[in-house]
């Protein structure tokens, strides 16, 4: 027979399993004496049994309610934990309530009971913070959000400069990351002050990022718009507040994706900046962003994982990958190439599909080097990924609409690892080539070619203009002949003196 646990014993057990203790950026613990008022919820005298309260109020908070093991977790007990959930919700949008009696567990995601995998057991705190994380990134939705943001800033707010629109959005995302108060109903002044204040505080806290954050803030303060954001007209004020409310909603959705476990780094920000750059004018063309499926492919062929650091300046034997125009190395000076290959070894060249960079007429390859190792004339492997399976979607760039990329990527990761397994594979001498070599079409000659050459020579000998003769022959065949059509062929009979000469 199981031993009956007191509420104190259950609380201690929950503390150990959940891992509720203070750590950097989080106020966490269990107890009977601490009130919500002491935890920062002004005027609330109720006492939670356990709490997990991040400094960043955009993160997930957890509140614990414990009972002795003899008490069944029924309606009354549920009402207690939900009351505490609602208290925490006054400061946190994402709140998980955990009800526990030492044996049974009931979990509430907000005020709705959660009954997913593992919900009937007590877990470490990360299990519960993950409940609000996005488990799948809808790329199409991110594209739609980005287009809405760009159009809103461009046509509604009147920010004509593309880069100012990008900086404005980036600042809002950074501010969201640092827990800026951004809610619907704000006027323009409150909204921009919240962003500037949040980034300003971040400048003080995050010394290493000061330069980048300071640059963002400097540009943000210079952004001007044509919309009268400070109008005293009530109708115009409401319009501005509605626009800001929409913008905040879109930014929040993108921010949630950035903070999700489904985000691989390139998924959202790659989509975001690539989508913005589609709106560049020709005069603004220059830098282009690598499509996210290709950056992901590069991570895979280099075997990069979450524990690695991706750097520019690296130690010997580090694998390095660059996307460059196909013939970039071959067009470099002999001195440059000699210096590069003296210090680094070209290992692989993967020629990429044509039209990869939407709207840019350039063919590219991935060049994989081993840093700090001389080439010494050794051959390198090359192959050609002729297609990535993506299709052009009107006004949206190139997308994997037919779901082909996963299989294509897997094939090429395998080919590049084994350095074999595809008809395009090559081994090339760096003294002769520094790029993938497109196979030359075999030389072929046909009887018709021989006849044409002989005819051209005979006409040349007799002084006949080949072009004029050809035109006259065509006119004669088309307009001075009898034409009859059967089911599978057309017959042209030439005439002489108005009668057929009997030859076809």
Image: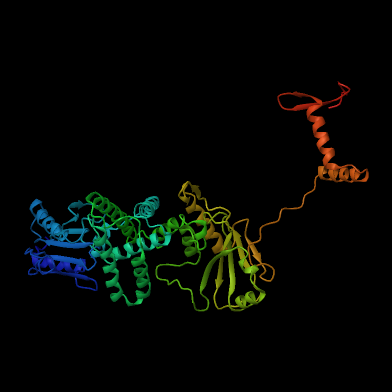
Quadrant of residue 338 in the image? bottom right
User: In x, y percent, where is residue 393?
Assistant: 48, 47
Residue at 9% over, 67% down: 35
User: Residue extending furthest top?
Assistant: 499
Residue at 24% over, 74% down: 24
User: In x, y percent, where is residue 212?
Assistant: 38, 72
Query: Is 24 placed left or right of 414 in the picture?
Result: left
User: Residue extending furthest front?
Assistant: 232
Which of 171 and 457 lies nearest the eye of the viewer?
A: 171
User: In x, y percent, where is residue 279?
Assistant: 45, 55
Picture quarter with the C terminus: top right
Numbered marks: total: 0
Does residue 17 appear in the picture of this structure? no
Query: Is 414 placed left or right of 452 in the picture?
Result: left
Query: Is 502 placed left or right of 345 in the picture?
Result: right
Does residue 473 appear in the picture of this structure? yes
Query: Is 479 placed left or right of 146 in the picture?
Result: right
Give the vertical position of 59 relative to 399 (above or below).
below
Which of 200 and 140 lies nearest the eye of the viewer?
A: 200
Give the vertical position of 92 relative to 145 (above or below).
below
Residue at 20% over, 59% down: 95
User: In x, y percent, where is residue 158?
Assistant: 37, 55
Give the vertical position of 401 relative to 161 (above or below).
above
Q: Which colour scheme is used?
A: rainbow
Quadrant of residue 367 in the image? bottom right
Picture quarter with the N terminus: bottom left
């Amino acid at each position: 027979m199981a031993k009956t646990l007191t509420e104190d014993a259950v609380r201690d057990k929950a503390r150990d399993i959940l891992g509720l203790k203070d750590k950097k950026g989080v106020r966490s613990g269990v107890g009977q004496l601490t009130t919500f008022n002491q935890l920062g919820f002004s005027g609330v005298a109720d006492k939670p049994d356990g709490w997990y309260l991040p400094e960043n109020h955009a993160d997930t908070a957890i509140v614990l309610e414990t009972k002795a093991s003899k008490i069944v977790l029924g309606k009354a007990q549920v009402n207690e934990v939900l009351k505490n959930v609602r208290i925490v919700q006054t400061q946190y949008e994402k709140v998980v309530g955990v009800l526990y009696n030492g044996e049974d567990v009931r979990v509430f995601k907000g005020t709705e009971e959660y009954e997913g995998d593992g919900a009937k057991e007590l877990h470490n705190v990360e299990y519960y913070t993950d409940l609000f994380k996005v488990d799948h990134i809808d790329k199409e939705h991110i594209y739609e959000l980005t287009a809405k943001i760009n159009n809103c800033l461009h046509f509604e707010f009147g920010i004509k400069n593309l880069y100012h629109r990008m900086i404005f959005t980036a600042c809002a995302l950074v501010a969201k990351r640092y827990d800026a108060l951004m809610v619907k109903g704000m006027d323009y002044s409150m909204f921009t002050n919240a962003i500037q204040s949040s980034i300003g505080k971040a400048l003080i806290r995050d010394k290493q990022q000061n330069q980048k954050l300071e640059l963002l803030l400097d540009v943000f303060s210079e952004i001007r718009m044509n919309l009268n954001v400070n109008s005293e007209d009530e109708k115009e004020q409401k319009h501005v507040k509605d626009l800001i409310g929409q913008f905040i909603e879109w930014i929040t959705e993108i921010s949630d994706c950035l903070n999700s476990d489904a985000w691989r780094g390139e998924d959202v920000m790659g989509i975001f900046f690539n989508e913005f750059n589609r709106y560049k004018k020709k005069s603004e063309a220059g830098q282009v962003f690598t499509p996210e499926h290709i950056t992901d492919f590069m991570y895979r062929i280099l075997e990069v994982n979450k524990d690695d650091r991706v750097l520019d300046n690296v130690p010997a034997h580090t694998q390095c990958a660059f996307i460059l125009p196909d013939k970039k190395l071959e067009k470099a000076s002999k001195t440059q190439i000699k210096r590069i290959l003296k210090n680094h070894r070209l290992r692989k060249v993967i020629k990429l599909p044509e039209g990869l960079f939407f709207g840019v007429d350039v063919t590219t390859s991935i060049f994989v080097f081993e840093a700090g190792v001389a080439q010494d004339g050794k051959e390198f492997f090359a192959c050609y990924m002729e297609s990535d399976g993506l299709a052009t979607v009107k006004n949206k760039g190139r997308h994997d609409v037919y779901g082909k990329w996963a299989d294509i990527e897997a094939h090429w990761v395998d080919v590049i690892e084994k350095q074999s397994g595809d008809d395009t594979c090559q081994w090339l001498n760096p003294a002769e080539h520094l790029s993938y070599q497109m196979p030359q079409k075999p030389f072929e000659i046909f009887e018709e070619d021989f006849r044409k050459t002989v005819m051209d020579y005979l006409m040349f000998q007799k002084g006949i203009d080949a072009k004029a003769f050809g035109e006259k022959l065509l006119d004669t065949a088309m307009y001075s002949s009898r034409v009859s059509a059967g089911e599978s062929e057309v017959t042209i009979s030439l005439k002489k003196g108005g009668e057929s000469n009997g030859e076809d």
